[in-house]
Amino acid sequence: MSARWIDDPILRVDALTMRFGGLVAVNEVSFAAGRGDITALIGPNGAGKTTLFNCLTGFYQPTSGRIAFSPERLDAEKIERLTRSARKSDGDTFLLERMADHEIVRKARLARTFQNIRLFQGMSALENLMIAQGRSLSRAAGFSVLGLLGAPSWRRAERAAVDRAAGWLERIGLTGRADDPAGELPYGDQRRLEIARAMCTNPALLCLDEPAAGLNATESRDLADLLRAIRDEGETSILLIEHDMSVVMRISDHVVVLDYGQKIADGSPVEVRENSAVIAAYLGVEETDEPAAEAALAESAKTGSDAT
Amino acid sequence: MTRGDHIFRAAREAAWATLVVAGLGFPIIAYRAEPDFNNALMLQARWPLFFEFCLAAFVLRFALALWSGGAAKAVARERIWRKPGWLGPVALAVLVVYPIAIVGALGPQAALKWVDTYGVQILIYVLLGWGLNITVGLAGLLDLGYAAFYAVGAYAYALIAPATGLGFWALLPVCGLLAAFWGFCIGFPVLRLRGDYLAIVTLAFAEIVRIVLINWDVVTHGEAGLFGFPGLNFFGLPFIPGPRGFAAHVGLPFAGVHKPIFLYYLVLVLALAANFVSLRLRRLPLGRAWEALREDEIACRALGLDTANIKLTAFALGAFFAGVAGCLFALRQGFVSPSAFTFSESALILAIVVLGGGGSQLGVAVAAVFLVGASELLRELTFLKSVFGEDFDPAQYRMLLVGLAMVGMMNFRPRGLVSTREPTIRLGPEPAK
């Protein structure tokens, strides 16, 4: 079995370290995410998953390390050349640790959601999706001048953006509530709306921070279907942090496990499930109790796949 | 709850309120420091007044508690209110007819005050309110120093007009752009700040501007201010008596009210233009980005919005409106001095925006009419002198009015006069009115 994260990665993280004072939250972590894959980043609480995410998306400036990203093709030689130069990007290859958060979204096309949902609560669901398309729309609005005059080109662009947003609302089943404030939607709908909003930025890599947190069984099944559908369309790869093992095992192509800021395992879901270090980290058992822990983890994964 | 319980609770609440009033009032009401003829300070006891205040507090609180049946009930009263469609055209018609109707009804002499003080002044505040509404109401950036930009506009006109000989048509945009430039400049250092910290920096900026105006004697003439700069003219015709004036040209008898009427329409047109721009911008990516910034800055960054640009444009456009308003202020007064741009001016404009319900154009306009109009009306209440004695100056109770308005708002409409937010774009049909 060929691994896409080795042959054709979209993201390559090398020796990434993030230090907060004396605390090393992420310690020399290296991994790659495959183009067209759903890559899951798992690990116990406090393992450094969200910190790593914040480094990828420019919210934190990593202490050291390199994050190379390309929506098209990641070429090792090109990365080396770029690293030696002082530039942020070369064509479609980007060094994310050198870029500001909004540049990462706009230029490198990497979008994210948050562990605690961050919708624009007072604004309608449709408006939330329109804001996500603001970048391309504001060009069409001619820096507001054409928009103020109501130019036809702006009207066309606005209609196209509304259609796109309406398509996403349809897809997540929120067409009927398009004009309601996002903060008044049920929790599960808010989660899906946040994903739709990130998708409206037209990302090459979608980073989801615990998308299934707080969802019931039906909702997380719907979510898994949505994520798989996004992956299967082929335009967007997915990187997600998740605690819900049933979701992880069911949809991911590749799992990276962190514990205490270090990578302890990396591979296909099956490989990771059988990895003794992972079992120990997850269930907090001594190595001697290994068989029992392994059985427990296999059991939880099994109930997960049964649900599909 | 029985009636007895009810009265007992009301009495207990009233007793607490009285205690608070007594505690607060003791140092400021019971004793007053007065200089005697040697200029030494003498403490003057005013116990009767103090007890009158305590009694008033008790009676009022008791009555309020009985009437409302406790404080908790008052909050849930906010009703969803939708603007009826006829309101805009009717309001516009009233505004257009207003000065002519007043002159017709009262004659040109008596109408002067109604056109100038009430008409022009209130419209300038509406313009200021709409400008600050962009910064505070839409973008959510708390600006406590808005009067600084107002001052920049006023001084820009007063300094540039005599020096260059340019008319006000040319200088209106110049004043706006200069103020916007300063809005941009103050925007830069505060890009990383939010909330309280931002408010303090803007407050300090306004003080810096005011103190520069006071101390830069050579240019600004300090506290004395600037006057004698060219005033308003009607497309080249000055508003003066005699054959060269506006009145003689159009064949009207000269009247002092012509100038304020022209200024009134000028401000009205500019305010409507500002309103149009604000409403249109709300529907554009820039306006939506402002509101998104108010809602959640981190989410904005995660969507690739450049928050620095969004903040700077919000500051600059808000300041632009203030600059234009400042120019109009200079035209109206014919005199500018630093005392017109103190903190209380910023506070009044902010009160207009907050009372109006951040984000709502109509609410801001109504709040401006109410706060500015009512405080001007206070000056009219001279008959109160016969009740409270000759020393009573009703105009001094202006700030009390602002306070009362705020307390009333907190109780009945905690999110402002017009607090319902209409989405800037809809997928479904408009909801039934």
Image: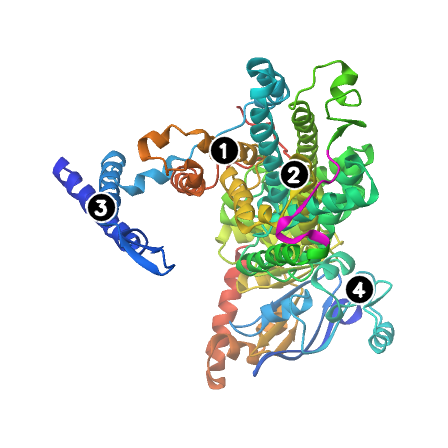
Q: Are marks 3 and 1 on the same chain?
A: yes
Q: Are marks 2 and 1 on the same chain?
A: yes
Label 3 neighbour load within 10 Å: few <14, some 14-19, many 20+: few
Task: Specify whether residue B43 is in view.
Answer: yes
Residue designated by label 2 = B329
| Distance in Å between CA atoms under marks 3 and 2 | 44 Å
Judged by depth in the image, the label closer to the viewer, 3 or 4, is 3
Specify the amino acid type for callout 3.
Pro
Query: Which residue reaches farthest front?
Result: B38
Specify the amino acid type for callout 2.
Phe
Nearer-N-terminus badge (3/1): 3
Specify the amino acid type for callout 4.
Ser
- Label 4: which secondary element: loop
Q: Are marks 3 and 2 on the same chain?
A: yes
Residue designated by label 3 = B48
State whether residue A208 is above or below residue B395: below
Q: Is residue B224 magenta?
A: yes
